[in-house]
Every structure is written in structure tokens, then in C-alpha cells.
Amino acid sequence: MIRSRLSFARLYLKIVTLLLPACSYFIAANLRFRIGHLFGKPSAGIPSYWGILLLTTIVWAIAAEESGLWNVEQLYAPSGKTRRLLEGEAFTYAVVMVAGLVYPPASYSPLVVGTSAVVLFVLATTVRVIFRVFLEQMRRRGRNEVKILIVGTDQFAQRVHASLVHEEVLPCRVVGFVRLPGQDISVHGAIYELDRLPAFSNGSSIDDIIIALPASRLSEVQKIAPVLERLCVPTRVVIDLGEGVGLRDRLIDLGGINMLDLRPTLAETGSYLFEKRVFDFGFSIFVLLVTLPITLLIALAIKIADGGPVFFVQDRVGLNGRVFQIFKFRTMAVGSSCEEGDTRWTCEEDPRRTAFGAFLRKTNLDELPQFLNVLRGDMSIVGPRPERPYFVERFLQEFDRYNSRHLFKAGITGWAQVNGWRGDTSIAKRVEFDLYYLRNWSLTFDLQIITMTLLRMFTSKNAY
């Protein structure tokens, strides 16, 4: 009953959400062209938006799914609702704009498309608020109340009971508790012994059974389940593996073996694997094409200066601790010790730098070849900066959770870097900012970091 009611609520929210692009284009076109209808035979000078509406709806559906816009539980999230909505909409209209460049939008008004984006945000926000108010009214009136029988009578069961009766998404009422042999009683209400369960009439007295046992007694579920079968209602088990270990849809069924991720990471979500990769690839191609003249001039200048190699290649540690080779424009004099470069920080007025190399480092132009690393999949545009293996081994011993940085792809720029923690600065602070990025990653956050990087590109204090 719990799952079915959540599924119905999610379905209704999903249908309404998918209809929002059509509503937004209808309103935007009316505002722009002052017509009474949008779809049908186009009037003279008034375009038909069927094609762009279809594209927008398809991409919006993908973005909304990845952002969880029709997950009812997200309506009650304490924070992040607006951010997720903006992420989904930004991705949708970014694809629409790219499509407009590929297929010249001769019949589309850019003003209508832009207005529809604003209207879509307003409509989506309004729908979500109305939906939550509606659910809240139903909860207060006790309508569609879920009647629950809890298996367990100890303090753990009491905590589960308290959470259920204060549940905001679905109104719940606990009709009784089932005591297991040897269990303390910390709950208030009707209590039944496991071997003397009443025959709840025609299944109308309870909708769901929830087994609320601490982790130490979960092995008893196999013995309890057969006894509960005769009640003929869905049975669920509360999973609590302690503070810091959450499920978050991290159950994996592999060959009949159920596994739980103890360290869930956003790097395994569809939005990270697909949307971030698409963005990285497209943005890298764009940057490499735009900066091609500069790249050729830099390569020529390096070659003329001392005749040495143009690129500097060095081992760095990336995703999941794998070592890859990073590309940079060479900024050191030919003959500088490679081993020394692997175990020593670059410092201000470093004698190993060439004059042109110092300029490249100060302006961060020596990082341009790393977009090739992004195309190869070794790196991302935004992420924790990759470190040399020597320093990784050292920092693993000195700083807690340092290795968590390697749960994401290494980046050309990162949250720590745009906040000044780069070069020979505090590693503890760098880890702190990197972990914040890992916990709060989103495409919107990436765009914010890229914007901050561009604004501070030529004024970095620790770029030497």
C-alpha cells in the first residue's frame, strides 16, 4: 500500500511535469504573438512550434528524471529543490540551443524560446508547491491513511513509530505492535505476541507490515516472514546500518546477490556519467577550436625558445586511484630533473622555469592541453585537481578522507582552486573544499566554478 500510493502520487506529478513544456510554449507564444491558439495551421508570420516543443519535452523528460523532479519525497527536501529544478531546465534549454545552431531556427522566435524557459520555471515551481499543499491537506484530514502493523517493541521500533506518524508524504497510523521473544517493550499501543497474532478482518485493519528490528536482529527476518504471510499484506523491513551509511537507491542486484553501497557517490549516477560527460566533451571541443590559434602560437614560441619538446607529460592520480598521464605545455627548462619534478612543489621564482614558462603559468595557459585529457576521458572540466603519486601516498598518511577525492574524475579546475587553495597551500583546506564539491556536485555547480575560473584566470595568486 505504501509503495502503490507513492507510485500513484509520483505518476500524477510526472504527468503534470511532462505537460509543462507545452503549457510554457503556449503562454510564451501568446505573450509574443498575441494569438488565441498555438497549435494548428500556422498563421502568416506566426511559426509553428511543434518541432521544438517535441525536442524540449523529450530532453525535459530526461533531465527531470535525473534531477528527481517527480519524486514526491523531494517535495519535502529541506534544501536543494530550486537548484535541482534549475539544473534540469538549464540542461534542457542548453540542448535546445545547440539544436538551434545545428538547424537554423528560421521559423522560431528566440524571444519565445527564452520566455518559455522563464514560464517553465514558474509553472514547475507553482505545480510543486500546489502538489505539496494538496498532500498536506490530505494528511491533516486523515484521508488515504496507511494503517501499519509494526513488528518490534523495543526502542528501535519506537523510533520507527515516531518517524511514521510524523511522515509528511503519506499519512500513517500504527494500529499495533508485534513483540518478539525476549524483546523489551518501549512502545505504547496494542501489543501482540508473534505466535498469537489476531486474524485482521479481510485485510481491512492493516495495509502494511513493517519489520522494525535493529541490525543485530535482522537475521530473524527469515523466521518471522512465514508467520506474517497469512496476513496477506505487503511486508517491509527497516534498514538502519548506523549513522553515515544510507541506502539512497544504492541496492544492486547482481546475479541474484543483493549488495549495498556503503559509500554512495554521485559519480555513479546517470547525470554524472551521461550529462557531465556530454558537457565535458562538447565544451572541450569548443575550447580547443576557439584556442587553436593561441595553442599554435604557444607551441611555436616554446619550440623557438630552446628547441625542446612542446608538451610536458607527467603521471597523476585520477578516478578510483588510477594513474594517468597529464598533458601540459612545457614551462621548465630542458634538462630539469624529472624525478625532482615528481617530488617537489613549484615555488615562486622557481629557477627551473623559463621566462615564457613563467608567463604561461601565471596566465594558466599551460593548462590548455589538459582538454585533450578530458576528451580521452582521463579528466573532467571540473573536479579535484590531480596530484602526483608521490604526494598522494604522503597525503594519505597525513589527512583523513584524502582518498575520497578520487571518487570523482580529476578536473582542470575545481572548487578548491577557485577559492584560492592551489599550489603550495593548505592541503587540509583543499581536501575540505574538494569534499564539499563531491557532496554537492551538479551541472549548475560546475557552471558556477567554470565562470569563477574565467573571471580569475589571469589573477591567480598561487599560479607560479
Image (cartoon, rainbow, N blue to C red):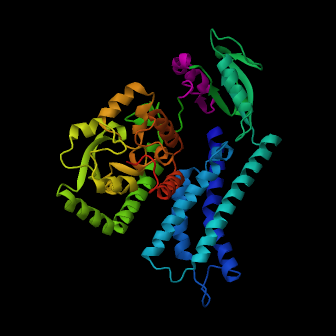
Quadrant of the image occupied by residue 145 = top right
> Which portion, as a residue range, is magenta?
215-244
**Residue 264 horizontal side relative to residue 179, left or right:** left
Residue 318 vs 354, above or below: the answer is above
Picture layout, residue 232 above or below residue 72: above
Q: Nearer the viewer, residue 324 or 126?
A: 324
Left or right placement of residue 85 versus residue 185 in this view: left
Residue 132 sits inside the magenta stretch: no
Residue 299, position in %: x, y?
25, 62
Residue 436 pos. (x, y %): 52, 40
Q: Name which quarter of the figure residue 49 lies in.
A: bottom right
**Membership of 235 in magenta stretch:** yes
Give the camera-side residue of 296 and 53. Answer: 296
- Look at the picture and state if 360 lies above or below 118: above
- Residue 345 in view, yes or no: yes
Extreme-right residue of the structure = 141
